[in-house]
Image: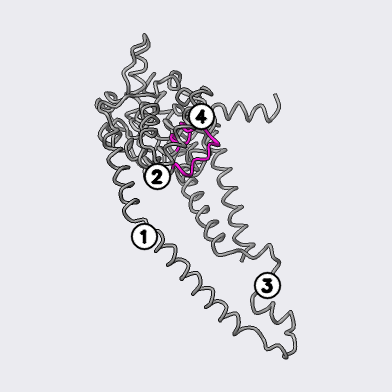
Amino acid sequence: MTAAATRMVDGSPVAESEDLTLVRQAAAGDSRAFEQLYRTHVDRIYGLCCRLCHGDTARAEQSTQDAFVRAWEKLGSFRGESRFGTWLHRLTVNVVLGEHRLLKRWVTFEDGVGTEDESSTDAVIPSQHEDAGLKMDLERAMSRLPKGARTVLVLHDIEGYQHEEIASLTGIAVGTSKAQLHRARRLMRGWLQ
Amino acid sequence: MNEFEKQQMRDSNGGDEEPPIPGLGGLKRENAPQRDLWPGIDSRISAQRIRRQRKPWLAAVGIAASLVLVLTASIGLQGLHGNRQPPLHSPPMLPVVAAASDNSLLPATNRMHPETRALVKANLKIVDSAENQIKRAIAADPDGQYLKSLLSTTQQQKEQLHVVLADAR
């Protein structure tokens, strides 16, 4: 992962080494160490789940729990080659997208665009900055996108994944990912003008 | 600007002629859940730990069963190979006859393992689907040069896969 890795939660060397120590303890069965990892990363993972679940908070909560349980099960396979946050992020995308199945089903040009979904914008972080209006517009426009296009847009433009990574994570072709991103940006631009 | 730099420029835009939406990359990525999700996680991982502690013998039984299976299979395979081997005193078979029976007269590069063939076919399916979707995108945006070049690349990939399959026979 490239940009996505650099955007992960506090990626300082100290935080990384703390994570690594906690991972080793958790892999040895220490659930308190795992709880600390949970506390460090939950906001980032829940934020990701909210976006991938398109604002469905109940599903986002469930997916967050599933992701951490899956992480606990797979801690033994974490070799420390990437940051723990990056590894967890990727694992979460896999959990939410149902190990390649959901996105394949969603990614189609036959699905239409939606109407504004107020509930989905509730879940995605109202900004306190002066550009809150623009951000809310962006969230609203995103909520109107078809699921597949929205998911590719979130993974590429917000989470920083490359098309090749999206393809390998989801099982869709690189060309499909590019076409969906093109479509999503075009629709968004049209709505925001 | 050389071709590599141009490619990098394209990649920084997601390889897409449609530039990124301003402000999208600046959206907040963190969001605190409204309730503490840890108790639910803790109860699930505790249940797993208890299950593992209660049945340590189950893993041993599993390993033993696997060993028995492997041993049985290898004995069976040895038996099969044993039946095929010619008696020690018989004249050696002509290599051409042996080769003809297992199709190894074909150049090594032309032979494809069934799993590889299945993988190539699966890839072909994915590329097919990509081609269809790009065609639909072009129908919605007929002037999009980017989509047209994407379609041409996809069709080239498809042709290459067909060639691989055809070569492999």
Foreground residue, A34 or B80?
A34
Q: Name the residue under label 1.
A: B58
Per the rendered image, the range of residues in magenta is A75-90
Chain of the residue under label 1:
B
Chain of the residue under label 4:
A
**Residue for point 32% across, 38% down:** A63
Q: Name the residue under label 2.
A: A73
Amino acid on which the number 3 mark rests in the picture: Ser
Q: Mark 3 points at which residue?
A: B104
Q: Nearer the viewer, mark 2 or mark 4?
A: 2
Q: Is residue A86 magenta?
A: yes
Q: Which of marks 1 and 4 is in front?
A: 1
Mark 2 → mark 4, Cα distance in angstroms: 22 Å
Mark 1 → mark 2, Cα distance in angstroms: 18 Å
Which quadrant of the rendered structure holds the N terminus of chain B? top right
Chain of the residue under label 3:
B
The first of marks 2 and 4 along the sequence is: 4
Q: Is residue A63 above or below residue A136?
A: below
Dominant secondary structure, magenta: helix
